[in-house]
Image (cartoon, grey):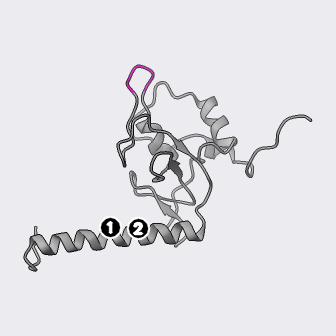
């Protein structure tokens, strides 16, 4: 009986408020944001970290964090502050995923990625890089093109 315990460890108060927003969010509901972070539904507004092999990079702001939110549609990571800036104001239309363009963009927070998830992501990134390199080489006729 009583209140349910939070899903994860307690979150410091300072990590429940954005500090690096590029634009002001006039309709940001700070209390709702705090509840979503404390309940584990949204990643904390972590301090940016150094790349150390454990931190993951937000593909929007390029800062490194202990963990990221994941797009529900394609699983791509995004930090909470970038997610907040993408979300529509009450007067605008729904937002599409910045990665796969699926309508009605939403994220979930699952905590830090496991080693197997990180390995899979590295393999996918390597495959994309190798494919792009093959296409570029084919289009260049085997010659390196400089910008």
**As drawn, which residue projects farthest toward the right?**
1
Say few, some or many: other residues with alpha carbon within 10 Å of mark 2 (under 14 / 14 to 19 / 20 or more): few
Numbered circles on residues, count: 2
In the image, what residue occupies the spot 7% across and 76% down?
Answer: 141
Say few, some or many: other residues with alpha carbon within 10 Å of mark 1 (under 14 / 14 to 19 / 20 or more): few
In the image, what residue occupies the spot 48% across and 53% down?
Answer: 75
| Pointer 2 residue | 124
Q: Which residues are magenta?
A: 89-93
Query: Residue 111: horizontal and vertical position, in percent?
Result: 62, 55
Query: Residue 27: horizontal and vertical position, in percent?
Result: 49, 24
What's the magenta bit mostly, secondary-structure-wise?
A: loop
Q: Quadrant of the N terminus?
A: top right
Judging depth in this view, the residue of 41 and 142 nearest the camera is 142
3D distance between C-alphas at marks 1 and 2: 6 Å
**As drawn, which residue projects farthest toward the top?**
91
Query: Residue 71: horizontal and vertical position, in percent?
Result: 48, 47
**Can residue 102 be seen at all in this image of the molecule?**
yes
Query: Residue 70: horizontal and vertical position, in percent?
Result: 52, 50
Decide if residue 32 is on the left or right side of residue 107: right
Vertical comparison of 54 with 86: above or below: below
**Can residue 51 be seen at all in this image of the molecule?**
no
| Pointer 1 residue | 128
Q: Secondary structure at mark 2?
A: helix
In the image, what residue occupies the spot 15% across and 75% down?
Answer: 137
CB-based contact (under 8 Å), mark 1 and mark 2: yes
Vertical comparison of 115 with 3: above or below: below
């Amino acid at each position: 009986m009583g209140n349910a315990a939070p899903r994860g460890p307690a979150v410091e108060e300072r990590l429940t408020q954005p500090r690096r927003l590029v634009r002001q969010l006039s309709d940001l509901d700070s209390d709702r944001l705090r509840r979503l972070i404390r309940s584990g539904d949204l990643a904390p507004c972590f301090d940016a970290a150094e790349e150390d092999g454990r931190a993951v990079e937000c593909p929007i702001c390029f800062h490194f964090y202990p963990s990221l939110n994941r797009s529900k549609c394609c699983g791509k990571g995004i930090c909470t502050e970038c997610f907040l800036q993408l979300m529509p104001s009450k007067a605008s239309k729904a937002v599409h995923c910045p990665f796969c363009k699926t309508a009605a963009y939403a994220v979930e927070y699952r905590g830090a990625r496991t080693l197997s998830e990180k390995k899979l992501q590295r393999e996918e990134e390597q495959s994309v890089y190798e494919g792009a390199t093959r296409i570029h080489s084919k289009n260049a006729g085997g010659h390196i093109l400089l910008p």
